[in-house]
Amino acid sequence: MRKVINCECGEVVRGNSDEEIVAAVREHLTRDHPELLEKLSTEDILGMAEEEE
Ligand SMILES: [Zn+2]
């Protein structure tokens, strides 16, 4: 199941599994929003993700 997160900055992050999207979001946060990295748990990230056809 592909998942997608539309970040508030306009970046679209995609992954092919829960693990992939969490890793991709953490990478994006590390690069662009390091202050959010510690605040968002894996559950938070998955809660933001939407399933994509
Ligand atoms: Zn962002």
Image: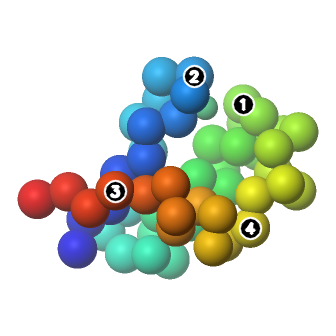
Amino acid type shown at disc 2: Cys
Residue 43 image position (x, y, % from top left): 63, 73
Cα distance in 3D space between marks 4 and 3:
16 Å
Given residues 53 and 24, the one toward you in this image is: 53
* Tag 2 residue: 9
Residue where numbered disc 1 is placed: 32
Q: Which residue is mark 3?
A: 50
First along the sequence among labels 4 and 3: 4
If you read the primary sequence from the N terminus, does the residue marked by circle 2 or circle 1 appear first? 2
- Asked whether disc 2 touches disc 1, contact meaning CB atoms under 8 Å apart, the reply is yes
Question: Which residue is pictured at 43% across the width and 57% down the height?
Answer: 49
Who comes first in sequence, dot 4 or dot 2?
A: 2
Residue shown at 88% from the left, 39% from the top: 35
Q: Within the displayed image, which quadrant is ligand 1 positioned in?
A: top right
Q: CA distance from mark 4 to mark 2?
A: 19 Å
Q: What whole-number distance in Å separates the C-alpha atoms at marks 2 and 1?
A: 9 Å
Q: CA gap, disc 4 to disc 1?
A: 17 Å
The structure residue drawn at horizontal position 50% and vertical position 77%, both measured from the top left corner, is 19
Q: Are marks 1 and 3 in contact (CB under 8 Å)?
A: no
Question: Label 3 vs label 2: CA separation?
Answer: 17 Å
- The numbered disc on residue 41 is 4
**Are circles 4 and 1 on residues that touch, CB within 8 Å?**
no
Mark 2 and ligand 1: say if the CB distance to the nearest ligand atom is below 8 Å: yes
Q: Residues within 10 Å of mark 1 (few under 14, many from 20)?
A: few
Front tag of 3 and 2: 3
Q: Residues within 10 Å of mark 4 (few under 14, many from 20)?
A: few
The disc, 1 or 3, on the residue closer to the chain's N-terminal end is 1
Which corner quadrant holds the N terminus? bottom left
